Image (cartoon, helix red, strand yellow):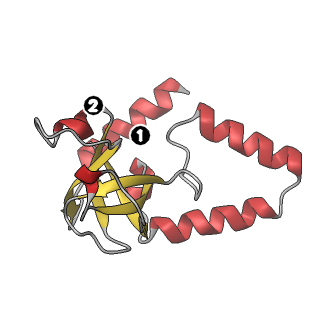
Amino acid sequence: MRIGQVVGKVVLSRAHESLVGAQFKIVLPLTFNDLAEPDPVESARELVEREGELSRASRVESAIERIMNPSFPRKLGNELVVYDDCSAAEGEWLAFSEGAEAAAAFGNQRRPVDAFGGAIIDAVTIDASTVKALVELKNKTK
């Protein structure tokens, strides 16, 4: 399960019969670093603006860095569409699963979804010893 921030919604004019009445949200996945940000979406927008001022070669380098380093801060463009079972509002954090786990949420009633939002997150608390251990682990892998 991952955490993402709702940045929009999807409106369907036609849908598979099993999806009638469903809500779909556009969700920006968050990294560990993003969880410490007061507003990860605004941080992503700022990153896009800064990259817009870079040369083409620098933007390509930055894109390669994001691909090779999954802890690199997320940016707009990595959003995905999530079946929202919780009625999450724009700006809220949503816990979601992807792939087979997302489809399993419906039991025998199969639905064509790739991501399922199962919980709205009110707060995330990470204790200092966990942060320290993760920083040490990250430094060892460099």
Rendered location of residue 91, percent (x, y): 37, 73
Q: Looking at the picture, tell me which residue is in the foreground, 10 or 26.
A: 10
The label nearer to you, 2 versus 1, is 2
Residue 62, above or below 64: below
Type of residue at label 1?
Val
Residue name at image x 27 percent, y 31 percent = 100
* Relative to 12, residue 116 above or below: above
Q: Check the picture and name the quadrant holding the C terminus.
A: top right
Q: From the viewer's perspective, is 111 left or right of 13?
A: left
Q: Is residue 107 left or right of residue 69?
A: left
- Look at the picture and state if 95 lies above or below 122: above
Q: Residue at x 58, y 56 (%)?
A: 75
Name the residue: 31% across, 64% down.
93
Using a 10 Å C-alpha cutoff, classify the residue at mark 2 as few (fewer than 14 neighbours), some (14 to 19) or many (20 or more).
few
Q: Choose top left, top right, bottom left or bottom right for residue 89.
A: bottom left
Q: Position of residue 37 (x, y in %)?
A: 43, 65
Q: Secondary structure at mark 1?
A: helix
The residue that label 1 is drawn on is 135
Q: Where does label 2 land, which residue?
A: 100
